[in-house]
Amino acid sequence: MDPLRIVVRVACAYVLLLVLVRLAGKTTVKHASPLDFVTALIAGDLVDDAVWAEVNASVFVVAAGSLFMVHAAVDYVRYRAGLAR
Amino acid sequence: MKEIVWIAGVTGLALGVVGLAVGPGHDTMTFVSPPEVVAEEFVRSLATGRYDRAARHLDDADGADAMLTAEGTSLRERAGAVSQVEGEAGSIGCDAATASTRITTSDAGELEWRFSLVRRTGTWKIQDWSAVD
């Protein structure tokens, strides 16, 4: 597989995840909850498929976007219910 | 709540960028699975009996279930367990490509399958394949 294409995929996946993580309000690992950790693991697995082109980039974008949207929604519900630390 | 809207917006924007790259940009290998990866995934699905996943890679998947089941069963009976599948790029054009896969099996050694693929709505689909003797 062309290394340059791998570089492009890695860079794009990194930038997208960076933006999504920042938008989800996560800036440090120090106060991460177990759910943040699980979300990070799932996101890492999604990147693996995208980097090796086992799925189309559109599938990765939809999956990562949905993951962070659900995560943000759960955080919001926890905050509203007074469960957030 | 604002975060969710922003995430949805960024996701939509990223989808738009990918759509532009694949559509008007005619990207055939970076933001879509390249032909050799599609062929590799197809053989892996076939070898492990996941025929529904294999059918997703076909250009014409209507009524392919029986054909794929027969092909997968025949492969396993003839060659035994598949231990490794490696895709190799062939020629690639704007809307047509070729690829091959080297399949390492327990009973029949190394097999080679050649694929012809066509580009449908941006993604590569398998049109035809054959074993190389």
Image (spheres, grey):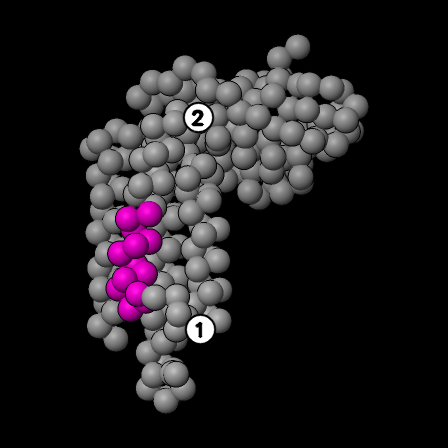
Q: Are marks 2 and 1 in contact (CB under 8 Å)?
A: no
Residue B52, visible in the rendered structure? yes
Query: Residue at the top extreme?
Result: B133
Mark 2 vs mark 1: in front: 1
Callout 1, which amino acid?
Ser
Bounds of the magenta segment? A14-27
Q: Residue at x 41, y 42 (%)?
A: A50
Q: Judge whether residue B45 is colored magenta.
A: no
Residue B74 place in picture, x, y as percent:
73, 28
Question: In screen coordinates, is B114 left or right of A15?
Answer: right
Depth check, front residue: B64 or B83: B83
Q: Residue at x 76, y 20 (%)?
A: B108
Q: In which quadrant is the N terminus of chain B drawn? A: bottom left
Tell how many labels: 2
Residue A36 place in picture, x, y as percent:
43, 67
Depth check, front residue: A36 or B127: A36
Dominant secondary-structure state across the stretch colored magenta = helix
Residue B6 place in picture, x, y as percent:
22, 64
Query: Which chain contains the residue that carries disc 1?
Result: A
Question: In screen coordinates, is A24 left or right of B86?
Answer: left
Query: Which chain contains the residue that carries disc 2?
Result: A
Q: Which mark is residue A33?
A: 1
Callout 2, which amino acid?
Met
Residue A57 location, quadrant: top left
Residue B127, visible in the rendered structure? no
Q: Are marks 2 and 1 on the same chain?
A: yes
Question: In screen coordinates, is A30 left or right of B40?
Answer: left
Residue at the spot of label 2:
A1
Depth check, front residue: B39 or A76: A76
Residue B50 place in picture, x, y as percent:
62, 42
